[in-house]
Amino acid sequence: MDKQADQPEMAAANGEDEPATGVFHTISSTDLVTQIARQITEAIVSGSLRPGARLTELQLSREFGTSRAPVREAARLLESQGLVVSSPRRGFFVRTLEPQDLHDIYELRIGLEVHAALLAVDRITEPELDRLQRQIQKMYALADEGSLEQQIMEDFTFHRLLCAASGNRRLLKVYDELATEMRCGIALIGRLFDSAHRLAETHEPVLDALRERNAEKLTAAVRYHIVEAQHQVVELFTEIRRRTNP
């Protein structure tokens, strides 16, 4: 018998049941850990699970319709990805990002996406350029509709397409990992710029430089775009943290 399973790291205090969150749904038996981790990740980045929230193994296993073991393994996987932290004898909790965390993420993005863009100068195809243009148009349309959450998702899609155009799959994998952490921070902020159209506008110089195959202009455009977003996000996030932790 697995004694560890009888003493879950995330069991509710005193064995009392906790109410269902309504966030998760029963999953199939194939690749349970990955599926559970994916659902918890989406709950975190969407803000359904807030920073500091405890991941209660017993409660989650009931919602997923599984035993406690795959829930525990999924939590450990998310811990390795930086979305969850563990506390001895207390279990796992949603990681609380600090302003410096977001500053560092965006700083890494600058180097990553400038390199991706420079690779893309020689590799990007006309269909890929057209796809980037369509992404910008989607962001403008969503700004008109007031659909901020979907607009932010299209922003991430634009940058993922840019990284994919580099032809470097490892680079794309790193971007995906960073994007998950960025989405967590932005979910707490609720916006990127005061003007919804500004988010779309900031991508135009990047696409223009790509179409011109102008490496110097592209480097400046990508750097400016990400630095501007960095300032906006970190400033807004710092203000929110100040209000919630006076």
Image (cartoon, grey):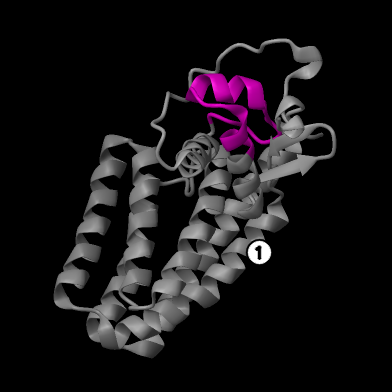
Q: Which residues are magenta?
A: 48-72
- Quarter of the figure with the C terminus: top right
| 229 left or right of 122 in image | right
157 or 134: which is nearer to us?
Answer: 157
Q: Does the image show residue 9?
A: no
* Residue 122 pos. (x, y %): 28, 88
Q: Residue furthest front?
A: 1
* Residue position marked by numbered label 1 in the rendering: 104
The residue at the point 84 percent across, 39 percent down is 88
Judged left or right of residue 77, residue 113 is left
Is 141 placed above or below 12 here? below
Position of residue 44 in the picture relative to residue 124 (left or right): right
Residue at image position (58%, 42%) is 74
Q: Is residue 188 above or below residue 161?
A: above
> What is the crowding at mark 1: few (fewer than 14 residues within 10 Å), some, or many (at least 20)?
few
Instruction: Report the amino acid beneath label 1.
Output: Asp
**Can residue 237 be seen by looking at this rendering?**
yes
- Residue at horizontal 34 percent and vertical 41 percent from the top: 150
Residue 60 sits inside the magenta stretch: yes
Residue 202 image offset from top left, x and y in percent? 38, 62
SS of the residue under disc 1: helix
Quarter of the figure that contains the N terminus: top right
> Toward the viewer: 22 or 189?
22
Residue 223 drawn above or below residue 193: below
Q: How many numbered discs sit on the rendered protein?
A: 1
Q: Position of residue 211 (x, y in %)?
A: 23, 80
**Quadrant of residue 116 within the rendered picture:** bottom left
